[in-house]
Image: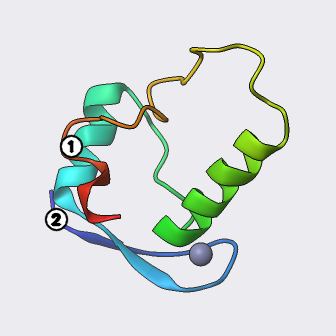
Amino acid sequence: MADKVITCKDCNTEFVFTENEQAFYKEKGFDNEPQRCHDCRRARKQQRNNNGGFGGGNNNRGYGSNNNRGYGNRW
Ligand SMILES: [Zn+2]
């Protein structure tokens, strides 16, 4: 595995999908590569939270929790 450069779908910025992140995705069972850069993803996540999508409580499908070991620590 090697780092991958992906172009963000939203802002067309190139970002690196690192080996570590790829491993993380694999471990989580995600087949898809991320399509958006970190900023856009964060923005979307925030938007979702603000949209009253709160209802389910704990349904952070393997992603959103704040303490997801070594993931969020650079962004
Ligand atoms: Zn972006």
Q: Is residue 18 above or below residue 68?
A: below
Q: Nearer the viewer, residue 21 or 64?
A: 64
Please name the residue shown 41% across and 78% down the image.
15
Q: Residues within 10 Å of mark 2 (few under 14, many from 20)?
A: few
In the displayed structure image, the side of residue 21 where residue 36 appears, left or right: right
Q: Residues within 10 Å of mark 1 (few under 14, many from 20)?
A: few
Q: Is mark 1 within 8 Å of ligand 1?
A: no
**For numbered disc 1, what is the local secondary structure?**
helix
**For numbered disc 2, what is the local secondary structure?**
loop
In the displayed structure image, the side of residue 71 where residue 37 appears, left or right: right
Q: Nearer the viewer, residue 40 or 46?
A: 46
* Number of the label disc, if any, that sits on residue 23: 1
Please name the residue shown 21% across and 36% down the image.
69
Ligand 1 in which quarter: bottom right
The type of residue carrying mark 2 is: Ala
Q: Position of residue 49 (x, y in %)?
A: 71, 41
Q: Position of residue 55 (x, y in %)?
A: 78, 17
Q: Which residue is mark 2?
A: 2
The type of residue carrying mark 1 is: Ala
Q: Position of residue 30 (x, y in %)?
A: 43, 33
Tell me where residue 16 sits by quadrant: bottom left
Residue at the bottom extreme, as displayed: 13
Residue at the right extreme, as displayed: 51
Q: Give the mark nearest the N terminus, 2 or 1.
A: 2
Camera-near label (2 vs 1) is 1
Q: Position of residue 11 (x, y in %)?
A: 66, 82
Q: Is residue 53 above or below residue 47?
A: above
Please name the residue shown 46% across and 84% down the image.
14
Distance from disc 2 to disc 1, alpha carbons, whole Å, reads 10 Å
